[in-house]
Amino acid sequence: MTPAELKTYLNQLVSKNLKISTMIWGAPGIGKSSIVAQTAKENDIDFIDVRLSQLAPTDLRGLPVAKEDTSTWYPPEFLPRTGKGILFLDELNMAPPAMQGVAQQLILDRRVGNYIVPERWFVWAAGNRKEDRAAVFEMPSPLANRFLHLEVQPDFDSFKAYALLTEVGEQIIAFLSFRSTLLHKIDPQQPAWPSPRSWVMASQLHKVGLDIAPAVGNGAAAEFYSYITLYETLPDLAPILEGRGNNISFPTEPSVRYATTTGLTVRAANASQAYSAFLWLSEKAAAEWVQLFATDMFRQMRNKGQMGALAQLVQKDPQLQKFLKDYQELMGV
């Protein structure tokens, strides 16, 4: 499933209050832990991220403390005691077998030692696959059989939705729109390689003028820097956003077209500018480019609380009304 589909599924588990232990599989860097954290935030519940590969069994079970003629296990403070939330056991299959054995008690029995997981908490886990060249241990069959298994794959549309929401740099989004195969590409020979996580880091580096190669590797960085030279041939987007783009043509080069539609999406600060860009594209570009822009622009306007104002502007324009009708039929809305 895609990251967006994973998020929807996890939200359903929470909303339906299904306390089924869930294992999320996927390549490193595609946002598994981020999606779980977002799910907790959107449902207004707590979130505890436990990296099992960094713990010893006693870190999870707790320490034995002598009490008269017996000993009592004192659980660690990071385990939840009250409230409602998600206890997320990350890097489960990177933990050594002894650690997995302790985690198995927590996952299957919802308890370990003297500690009991509170009733209103979900217990989920995540791990990488063997084919991802991660240093993983085989998951015992009894443990695996007690999980729901959800496998998530890199997906550019999901990443773009996240990138637009979190203000990942415009040029990063435009480049990956054009070269989406570089969203996630493991290079076992190099320590740095492109993934959704490393592209977010690359965006932060690029914004302050630092080389992005340490985040995404030399090959992806070289392609990115070649791509952004295209910004010198980009049409002036400011007049378009102000409704003065009648004499500006839509570019002919596909890479520049991606840059133009992405630039208009990111730079539209309000409903008026989004409407101007929408109208210009509907007059100058083929339908597929208008659809690409519309999908991202609608998402942006919702995030900015401008969707109602945009809808009022669009209702006054017969040309855009026709496009929206065709768009809704195409999308099955």
Image: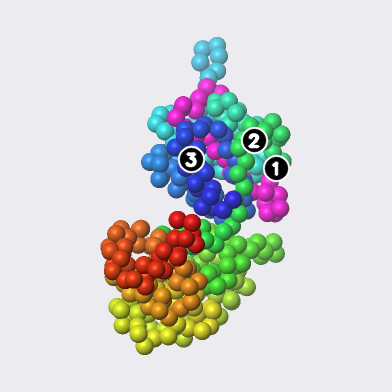
Three-letter code, disc 1? Phe
The x, y position of residue 22, in whole percent, is 57, 38
**Which residue is at a point 53% across and 69% down the rendered structure image?**
177
Q: Nearer the viewer, residue 139 or 147?
A: 147
Q: Residues within 10 Å of mark 3 (few under 14, many from 20)?
A: few
Q: Give amino acid for label 2.
A: Gln
Reading the image, the residue beneath label 3 is 12
Q: Residue at x 54, y 52 (%)?
A: 3
Tell which of 165 and 193 is nearer to you.
Answer: 165
What residue lies at 40% left-to-right and 79% top-to-bottom? 283
Query: Which residues lie in the magenta part?
Result: 112-136
Marks 2/1 in contact by CB < 8 Å: the verdict is yes
Is residue 238 in view?
no
Q: Answer with mark 2 or mark 1, whichever residue precedes in sequence.
A: 2
Residue 10 in view (yes/no): yes
**Local SS, label 2:** helix
- Callout 1 secondary element: loop
Residue 73 pos. (x, y %): 53, 23
Foreground pick, 202 / 300: 300
Callout 1 crowding tier (Cα within 10 Å): few <14, some 14–19, many ≥20? some
Which quadrant is home to the C terminus?
bottom left
Where residue 100 is drawn, which disc sits there? Answer: 2
Does the magenta run of residues contain 49?
no
